[in-house]
Amino acid sequence: MRWIIPAGLLSVTGAVAAAPVPLATLLADGTLAEIVVEPAAVMTRLGHGRSWSTDAPRVRTAIHAALEEPAGWIAANEPDSSGVDALLYPVVQGLLDGAVGQYARSHGGRIDLVDVRDGVVTVRLTGTCHGCPAAHLTLRHRLERDLRRWYPAVRVVDAGRAPVDRRAPRSDDAPVLRRR
């Protein structure tokens, strides 16, 4: 849907990598799939299974609120990731306070936000999530998936776990079992 705005109100044009929190939240929860800024309009595309008849009022309200923060709009082609990080932080925190965090809490665990830097979200898993074999699935298939709706280049890492380089040679002498 095309939302008409005063020409020149926003300094960015093209696909949006980051928007102020009201719109970023709609991207993160899947209400919006895409936002594109034109010189005198904001184009929005709904997420899969969404309907303008039910979602238009929320989108309109979010756009009005986001237009009050013109500096918070960052085009996908802008190299400055520090602005994206500042906008990404509250979206991550919102997901951890909401559905993603509730999922972890329902299993006796917790996911705490440690840092957001250069599009990398660092979290710490505690409670039953710490050391859980399925924790990486929760991070990838819940948190990272939801964040990628808003910022496709995001990566989530667990501060309590060293990153695994699957290409690195094994350092131990344990035999590697292979299926024939």
Image: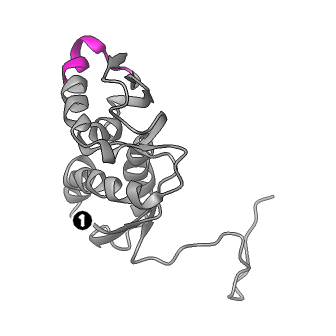
x, y percent for residue 140? 45, 54
x, y percent for residue 39? 43, 26
Instruction: Kindly give the residue lying farthest to the top in the view shown.
Output: 53
Question: Which secondary structure class fits the magenta region best?
Answer: helix
Position above or below: 109 against 46: below
Q: Residue at x 22, y 23 (%)?
A: 60
Q: Residue at x 21, y 64 (%)?
A: 108
How many residues crowd around disc 1 within 10 Å: few (fewer than 14), some, or many (20 or more)? Answer: some
Position above or below: 106 against 165: above
x, y percent for residue 5? 31, 23
- Magenta span: 49-57
Q: Provide the residue designation for mark 1.
A: 109
Q: Residue at x 32, y 53 (%)?
A: 87
Residue 146 shown left or right of residue 103 in the figure: right
- Looking at the picture, tell me which residue is in the foreground, 142 or 133: 142
- Looking at the picture, tell me which residue is in the foreground, 26 or 169: 26
